[in-house]
Image (cartoon, rainbow, N blue to C red):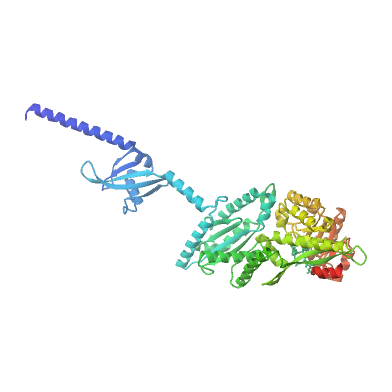
Amino acid sequence: MSKKENGREKEESLQQDHWNMNFYASGVEVLNSVGCGICVCSSDDKLLFANEKFCEFFYGRIDGKNVKRCLFRALENGKKNSGELYIKEAERWFDVHRTEICWLDQRMVELYTIYDITEIKRYQQKIEKQVNNDFLTGLYNRMRCEQDLEEQITRTKGNGGKGALLYMDLDDFKHINDGLGHQYGDVLLRAISHSLQRISGIESNCYRMGGDEFIIIVTDSKFAMLDKILADIKEIFEKPWFLKGADYYCTMSMGIARFPSDGDTVQELIKKADLALLEAKKAGKNRYEFYNEESEGASFKRLDLEKNMRNATMNACDEFEVYYQPIVDVSKPDNPCMGAEALIRWNCESLGFISPAEFIPLAEYLGLINPIGDHVLRQACSHCKKWNDSGHPEYKVNVNLSVVQLLRNDMADRVREVLEETGLNPWNLTLEVTESLAINDMTRMKQILGQIKKLGVRVALDDFGTGYSSLNHIREMPIDVIKIDRCFIEDLGQDEFADAFVRIVCELAAVIGMNVCVEGVEYQRQYEILKNMQIQMIQGFYFDKPMRAEEFEKKYV
Ligand code: C2E
Ligand code: MG
Ligand code: MG
């Protein structure tokens, strides 16, 4: 080969190298400008190439040696060719793909491409959260509860463990909602949810089922902590909540069903915990009850009660009869009758006679107290109008109002309509209300009672001494009559406190121009003691029991 030829060949080869290098350089430039990370690893786990994006994704987080191991893990230890990778430190997710290619030196190597899918992932999580979480409180919702419960039941059945379902309902939440407004009800629900989630052992197993109902699942790994969990939940409700400038107490009732012993399906467990919850409500609220089979009979009766009550309410309330218990005027000679308190009785066709103490709380709970209460009001007003027209224009009738009715926006309108309908003189109607903790919002209470009083109707404070009444409150409240509860009368003559309480309330009432009515007088000795105090009205078995309207009319009209 001539020198000249040799030189040309060298030049050509140099040109080729130069061209190769240029090609390589622009190839790298191309790879650096794509949006995904690219790397090439040799079979002995060396990083042969990584584009800029790849370095950016991994920079400072995974050193060269670990890259392959990390990618490999995302592919389920190399079993798959694509998978997902989460880099905790950067809080980012990546889609990882692997293919084999032939490298520059003809070796077979692995090419990895990774795509940042963090935004998609976050969006997905947001959607999942919306599907699984309750918008107001951020707790998981009913759907998620049922899913988790199903899973827990299967697990405990599989490993022979135990778990519990706690079904919780706030007591008289409606009063707070109606009394203070929904926005404060919401604040309370959020605060309660927050406190629940901070209880150790149930952090991620609290669910809001809707309204003021919550479920808590105690999983088998936490079942040994059940007593402590119950105590912690109880503690939340022992302190007041600061709402709208005042302290409010809110209690809860709870029913507990254990799985799998009480049931091994989602529906059955929720139903049984709910039955136990209603037992807790019936036993006086602010407590928890465990589901037990013996009370199931009673619970079924309750379900029956509910069904029958709905039917009775739909059928024009025919089964509800209003009885009347005379109230006598002991400030006049011979203690004449001055009217009566209307007391509802339910003569249920299929369940027999049911006392108001048993069904009124349920009617309140079911929201049926409004139609039932309207029925009592109408009956009582029309009966009293009849007595007034039959020679006793001074007879008055007392009608009990539940707090639920009292907080109705249209209660005053309803009373006005019934007065117009029956033609009763408003002065002869007294509405009995009880104090409720939930309406320690005096402004609201005064406003509602004020509207009622504007109609000319009188207001009595029932069961005085048993609730949260403070003597100071009665001065502020627009009331005409204080009804001292039976429990003080029972102890009259035997307990100095009871004697002093009745005397002081009577003296105080006289000073502020209110009347006192004493309830539950059964014996002569009680009557004798009361006669010496400034009392105008007495109601009790000593004088007469509650009776049907016809009987009352025969005896007193
Ligand atoms: P309340 O308003 O305090 O009514 C007085 C209760 O004491 C009545 O019980 C009455 O029968 C009973 N009682 C009266 N005198 C005596 C006595 O000398 N000794 C004893 N041991 N008891 C006496 P009742 O009729 O069973 O009603 C219980 C409660 O149910 C009532 O207490 C009231 O809170 C509620 N209630 C009754 N009717 C209605 C109604 O129409 N609407 C509402 N919301 N509640 C009602
Ligand atoms: Mg009453
Ligand atoms: Mg009473």
360 and 92: which one is in front? 360
Q: Position of residue 235 (x, y in %)?
A: 63, 57
Does residue 156 sit above or below 141 in this rendering?
Answer: below
Give the number of callouts: 0
Q: Locate the C terminus by quadrant.
A: bottom right
Q: Which residue occupies the foreground of this view, 151 or 205?
A: 151
Image quarter for residue 262?
A: bottom right
Tell me: residue 522, above or below residue 58: below
For residue 504, say whether it is visible: no
Residue 170 position in % (x across, y down)? 63, 58
Image spot of residue 502 (x, y percent): 83, 61
Quadrant the N terminus occupies: top left
Residue extending farthest top? 4
Above/below status of 222 relative to 52: below
Q: Which residue is painted at 56% across and 54% down in the image? A: 197
Residue 68 visible in rendering: yes
In the rendering, at what x and y percent does residue 191 appear?
61, 51
Residue at x-position 80% and y-position 60%: 381
Side of 16 where 358 appears, left or right: right
Nearest the viewer among 32 and 307 is: 307
Q: Is residue 466 left or right of residue 302?
A: right
Extreme-right residue of the structure: 333
Which residue in the rendered view is the most extreme toward the left? Answer: 1
